[in-house]
């Protein structure tokens, strides 16, 4: 009696663990590094607190920062084909780049400390997927569009939408459609331009 139960119990535990790791974990979002493309030199990548000259093909992980001087021309490309281009003098930090087991974007979050970026975001399949660029004054969150964020040294923030629409949030929220732009100061949606 008891000798047969132990091997049977071991098999049940192994099957349960296999189901958990192969099915449940495979469906969860995983962090996937983005790839840095350096079109001209003078770009640095900070990883693990160490700032080094950046090379095309370098992986940008969550927590890494990309910075370049007035002559640099880098872009960050994500697994789904979305791209964020950095204008001279821009600095960003990748907060997260999460994708599901099928390679569909779950969440991409970028913190922009300075300068100007242009993001081209692929259309999203899942209802909960987001692509967000956060500045000092607001957050721009999109679901498949093309937009530009300018983070000025004085803390002001400007958003220009070229294709689609962007949900802009600070103290208040607004949808900024194609052909529109907004300027923000001090965590408030300041003015439609």
Image (cartoon, rainbow, N blue to C red):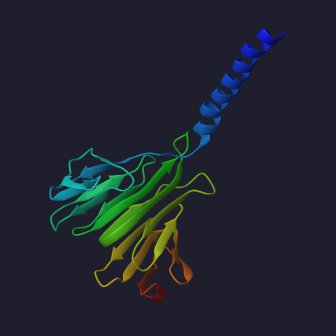
Q: Is residue 144 visible?
A: no
Q: Is residue 187 above or below residue 92?
A: below
Q: Nearer the viewer, residue 155 or 78?
A: 155
Q: How many marks?
A: 0
Query: Which quadrant of the structure image shows residue 136?
Result: bottom left
Q: Considering the image in quadrants, where does the C terminus appear?
A: bottom left
Specify whether 170 is left or right of 72. Answer: right
Q: Residue at x 53, y 60 (%)?
A: 130
| Picture quadrant of residue 73 | bottom left
Q: Residue at x 38, y 72 (%)?
A: 149
Q: Does residue 57 appear to the left or right of 111 in the view shown?
A: left
Evaluate whether residue 42 shows in this view: yes
Taking depth in this image into account, of 177 and 53 the one nearest to the observer is 53
Judging depth in this view, the residue of 67 and 159 nearest the camera is 67
Residue 148 placed where, x, y %? 38, 70
Horizontal placement of 25 versus 163: left or right? Answer: right
Residue at far bottom of view: 191
For the N terminus, the image quarter is top right
């Amino acid at each position: 009696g008891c000798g047969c139960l132990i091997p049977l119990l071991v098999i049940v535990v192994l099957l349960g663990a296999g189901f958990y790791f192969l099915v449940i974990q495979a469906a969860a979002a995983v962090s996937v590094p983005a790839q840095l493309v350096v079109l001209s030199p003078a770009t640095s990548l900070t990883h693990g607190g160490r700032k080094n000259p950046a090379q095309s093909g370098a992986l940008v992980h969550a927590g890494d920062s990309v910075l370049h001087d007035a002559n640099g021309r880098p872009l960050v490309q994500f697994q789904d084909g979305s791209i964020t281009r950095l204008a001279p003098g821009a600095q960003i930090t990748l907060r997260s780049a999460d994708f599901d087991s099928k390679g569909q974007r779950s969440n991409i979050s970028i913190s922009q400390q300075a300068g100007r970026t242009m993001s081209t975001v692929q259309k999203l399949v899942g209802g909960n997927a987001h692509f967000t660029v956060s500045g000092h004054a607001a957050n721009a969150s999109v679901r498949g569009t093309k937009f530009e964020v300018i983070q000025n040294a004085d803390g002001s923030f400007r958003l220009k939408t070229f294709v689609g629409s962007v949900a802009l949030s600070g103290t208040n929220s607004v949808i900024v459609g194609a052909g529109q732009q907004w300027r923000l100061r001090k965590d408030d949606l300041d003015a439609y331009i």
